[in-house]
Structure formats: C-alpha cells, structure tokens
C-alpha cells in the first residue's frame, strides 16, 4: 500500500494535466486555479484526518489532481518550496506536514478572489468591456491600453478564423519530428524513474547505511542551488547542451547507485557503500533538476 500511496500522486497529476486545458478554456485560468486549489485543499484535509489507507489514497489522488491541473494553468516550478517541504518532513510528523501543505493552498484559494481574470480569456468569451477593464487594472490607471486591447482582439479573431486542428494532424510528416522530440523528452523524463527515487530517497539512504535525515536535508539545499545556477546559465549555453549533460549525469548516477548496492549485497568495500549511494542519489536528483530546467517553456 505504501507504493500505491506514492504512485497515486503522479496518477492524479496526469489526469489533472489532461483535463486542465479544456477546463481553463471553459471557466478561465482563474476559475481553473480555484477549482484545482479546491482539490489540493480537500486532498490535504483527507490525509490529515485519515484513519485508514483509503482516506490517505483518496487524499493523495486529489492532491495530485490539483497539482497536475495547476501545472498547466500556472506552468512554474518553485524549487525553494519543494526544498522547504523536504526539510520540514525531516522534523514534522506527517499529519502536521499535511497541514503545512494546506496553508499555501488556502492562501491561493483566497487570493484568487483578489486578482482579475485573464483579459485574453474574457475577450475570447466576447466580454470585451470586461477585458479592457481588467487590462487597465493590470497595466495601471494611467497606462494606454488601446494598442494592446486591439492586439488581443485581432489575435482572438485570427485564432477563431483558423480551421480546427485534428488530432491526426500531429502525426503528419511536417509535425511528427517536433511531436516526437517534445513528447519523447517528457515521457523519457518520467520513465527515468525520478519519482521512485524522490518518493523513496529516505528509504534508500537508510538501507545504504546513511542518515535519511541528513541525506534529505543535503538534497533540499542542493536543489535550490542547482536550479538557481541552471536558470542563470541556460540562456548562455542553450537547452541542448544542458539536456546532454543532464542525460549523461542520469546514466552516471544510476551506475554509481547500482554499484553501491552491488557492493553491499556481495559484502565488498562496505565502508564506501553509504557514500556511493548518497552520491548517486544526490547526483541523480540534481542533474534531473537541470533536465527539468532545460525542458521548461
């Protein structure tokens, strides 16, 4: 059941990512964010009050759905938030940790009542007056929004005049290469096993004979540093070199981690096993952050 609990987050995220596009078109980005945050709130509450594994699983699935939907509406990854959760998890009980996850969801839910809707979505729905009013709020009271309002209107008209694309067009010769590259990168990213490593990092540290608390804290700190460095160099070195380095690092990290457990099973160089395992896991997690950064946008 522990494995199922970990996997349900990604299952929910997959469903949320698939449904969030049509949902954002129908009720707007603001409405989609509110709907998604409701699932996150409900999920964390279900986990906090859970008395059995069914409530835990449902809460995990709901939280995953909300995260997946939000990843489309607000495509932004904040490494510091993830790292903070890892560090807090080393000192807080799981029920208290669920409440800390609830706090930003509630802030988001309440804050959405204070921000305007997307001007483009309003214009797309034919609510041009509201679109201009919202645009004025966003740009400032004294800003001239006439040019931007016309640009949005022209964009919507151009978009609506285009023939509706069909799914099979993705597999046409002119589109196939881009689809294979884009989808392939994302699929291989998931099949690389990063979720298993993240979910079981503390257990791997413990089995290898290294302190899971220390290992998790080191990972959280390195996560912030690596993501910061990646975002500063990506425009200088380009995405392809960063992807190549990251992919090579993932292979090397797998070899190091595998070697550590091979030595442990065969009782060879046992003193080096903990350090090899920690090095392999940390290298894997950090180069994966580089992979994610290169895949952004």
Image (cartoon, rainbow, N blue to C red):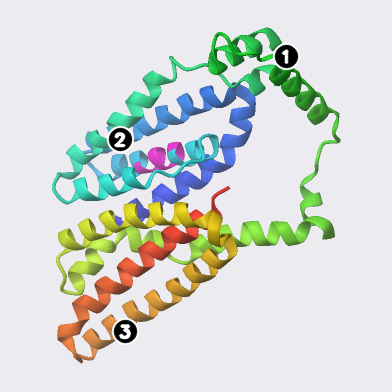
Front position among marks 1 and 2:
1
Q: Which quadrant would residue 56 be assigned to in this image?
A: top left
Residue 218 placed where, x, y %? 23, 60
- What residue range appears in magenta? 60-66
Whether the magenta-drawn stretch holds residue 125 is answered as no
Q: Residues within 10 Å of mark 1 (few under 14, many from 20)?
A: few
Q: Is residue 178 left or right of residue 81?
A: right
Query: Is 277 placed above or below 228 here?
Result: below
Q: CA distance from mark 1 to mark 2?
A: 37 Å
Disc number placed over residue 44 in the picture, else none: 2
| Residue 161, horizontal then vertical, whole percent | 86, 29
Mark 3 secondary-structure assignment: helix
Q: Residue at x 41, y 65 (%)?
A: 287
Q: Quadrant of the N terminus?
A: bottom left
Q: CA distance from mark 3 to mark 2?
A: 38 Å
Q: Earlier in the sequence, mark 1 or mark 3?
A: 1
Circle 1 SS class: loop
What residue did someone put label 3 on? 259
Is 207 left, or right, of 181 in this rendering?
left
Q: CA distance from mark 1 to mark 3?
A: 61 Å
Mark 2, Cα crowd under 10 Å, few <14 / some 14-19 / many 20+, is many
Q: Position of residue 205 (x, y in %)?
A: 22, 68
Discs 3/2, front: 3
Instruction: Give the mark nearest the N terminus, 1 or 2.
Output: 2
Q: Secondary structure at mark 2?
A: helix
Label ID, residue 126: 1
Residue at horizontal 62%, vertical 62%? 184
Whether 114 is drawn above or below 284: the answer is above
Q: Earlier in the sequence, mark 3 or mark 2?
A: 2
């Amino acid at each position: 059941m522990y494995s199922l609990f970990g996997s349900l987050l990604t299952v929910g995220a997959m469903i949320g990512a698939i449904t969030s596009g049509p949902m954002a078109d129908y009720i707007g980005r603001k409405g989609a964010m509110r709907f998604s945050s409701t699932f996150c709130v409900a999920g964390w509450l279900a986990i906090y009050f859970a008395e059995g594994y069914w409530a835990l699983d449902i809460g995990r699935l709901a939280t995953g759905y909300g995260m997946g939907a939000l990843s489309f509406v607000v495509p932004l990854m904040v490494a510091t938030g993830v790292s903070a959760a890892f560090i807090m998890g080393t000192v807080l009980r799981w029920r208290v940790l669920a409440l800390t996850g609830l706090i930003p969801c509630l802030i988001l839910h309440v804050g959405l009542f204070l921000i305007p809707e997307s001007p483009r979505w309003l214009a797309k729905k034919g609510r041009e007056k509201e679109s201009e009013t919202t645009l004025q709020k966003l740009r400032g009271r004294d800003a001239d929004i006439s040019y931007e309002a016309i640009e949005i209107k022209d964009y919507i008209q151009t978009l609506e005049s285009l023939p509706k694309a069909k799914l099979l067009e993705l597999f046409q010769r002119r589109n196939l290469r881009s689809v294979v590259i884009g989808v392939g990168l994302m699929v291989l990213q998931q099949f690389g096993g990063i979720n298993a490593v993240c979910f079981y990092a503390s257990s791997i540290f413990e089995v290898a004979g290294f302190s899971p608390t220390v290992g998790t804290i080191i990972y959280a700190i390195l996560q912030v540093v690596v993501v910061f460095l990646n975002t500063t160099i990506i425009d200088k070195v380009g995405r392809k070199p960063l992807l190549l380095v990251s992919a090579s690092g993932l292979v090397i990290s797998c070899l190091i981690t595998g070697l550590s457990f091979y030595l442990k099973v065969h009782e060879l160089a046992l003193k080096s096993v903990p350090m090899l395992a920690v090095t392999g896991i940390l290298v894997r997690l950090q180069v994966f952050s580089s992979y994610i950064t290169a895949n952004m946008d």
